Image: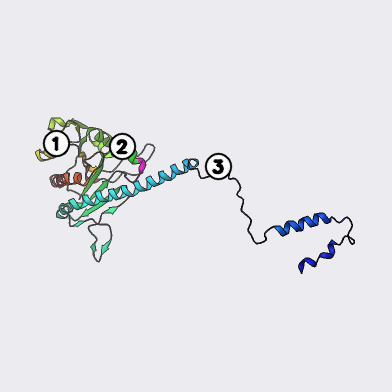
Amino acid sequence: DDSDEFAHLQDEDEFENFDKERVDSQEKENSQRPSDQPQPLKFADVPAHFRSNWTNYQVELLVLSGLVVYLLNYVYGKTKNQTLAYTWFEEHRELLEQQFAVVGDDGSTHGDQPTTSHLVKETDSTFAIWCSGRAGCQGMLVQLKLLKRQDLVSVISQMIRPKYDRVIVRVELDNNEMDSYVFALGQRKSLVKLVKEMTDLSLFTMEKKNADKLGLPASFTIFSEISEATTSMIDPRVTQVINKYEECIDYIHFSDQYSGLKPQEGETQTRLPESANVLVFGFNIPGKMGASERHIEQIKPLLSMVFYCLDKVR
């Protein structure tokens, strides 16, 4: 028996100052305590700032909600811009294929033939279409500069200051396919800014006219190097299209001395910039609060005007 193994330690005759009453009381207490019953757990009080109180996480919840909204807007805006770009391409594909042998060249080749029918995505809001294979024309670049719908900050800015989705068409002619003159017309505010920025317009367009004298909308103005070029280009057919699509035409720029933007202040050029025969058209897609597929279909005649002007310039 284990209880008798250490019984000799409780012998009063062997140990001095032996407290027999304390030992007996401990043995009695041990015998009354159930040995196999688990003791109840005691929970300590949790401080108030550690309890489940969502008001303490307002900043975290606000940041998380902002990230979710930004992500959803990015996905929606990116998809919307892709839809608009492909809609424009499909609406104008037939006309482009009538005018050019290669439409939608992305630079790659399949055998000996260039790859066609490709819409090149430059950014989430910028798309490009390159066309080539036309008499008297080196090629045509169409840039779709859409609103930055994927950027939440730009979306908020658009609500305050609405802007248009834009289509920029640039046609580069072969040498000797254009007479020597520089000419531009468009919305007064846009054209004045363009004249300040472009080298050829700032150097050669000395003549400024009010467009209403030529039967164009009063919101338009004209900058030209030669007055005969102005009267030749603005014929009744062009006048009719401009009056009908006044909101959609931002500017038209023809030049045999096109060399791009003016150099910045303090920037020096070691040689004269190369010039080219270029026709540039800046179009606005209607719907200032945001274009739709219906708006793109409405401006199909503007591309026909581009090819009419191209043939007239030649």
Where residue 52 appears, x then y in whole percent?
A: 51, 45
Where residue 201 appears, x then y in whole percent?
A: 25, 37
Q: Say which label, 3 or 2, has the lower sequence index.
A: 3
Q: Which residue is mark 3?
A: 49
Where residue 271 appears, x then y in whole percent?
A: 33, 44
Mark 1, other Cα within 10 Å: few <14 / some 14–19 / many ≥20: few
Q: Image height check: is 117 above or below 144?
A: below
Kind of residue indicated by mark 3: His
Is 208 included in the stretch rendered in magenta? Answer: no
Q: Would you say the residues marked 2 and 1 are in contact, meaning their CB atoms lie under 8 Å apart? A: no
Q: Say which label, 2 or 1, has the lower sequence index.
A: 2
Element under label 2?
helix
Q: Which residue is mark 1?
A: 243
Where residue 213 appears, x then y in whole percent?
A: 13, 30
Kind of residue indicated by mark 1: Asn
Q: Image height check: is 291 above or below 205?
A: below
> Outermost residue toward the bottom?
1
* Rendered image quadrant of residue 16: bottom right
Element under label 3?
helix
Asked whether residue 50 is in view, the answer is yes
Q: Image height check: is 21 above or below 264?
A: below
What are the residue bounds of the magenta stretch? 149-153
Q: Which residue is mark 2?
A: 159
Q: What's the residue at 24%, 36% (across, down)?
A: 204
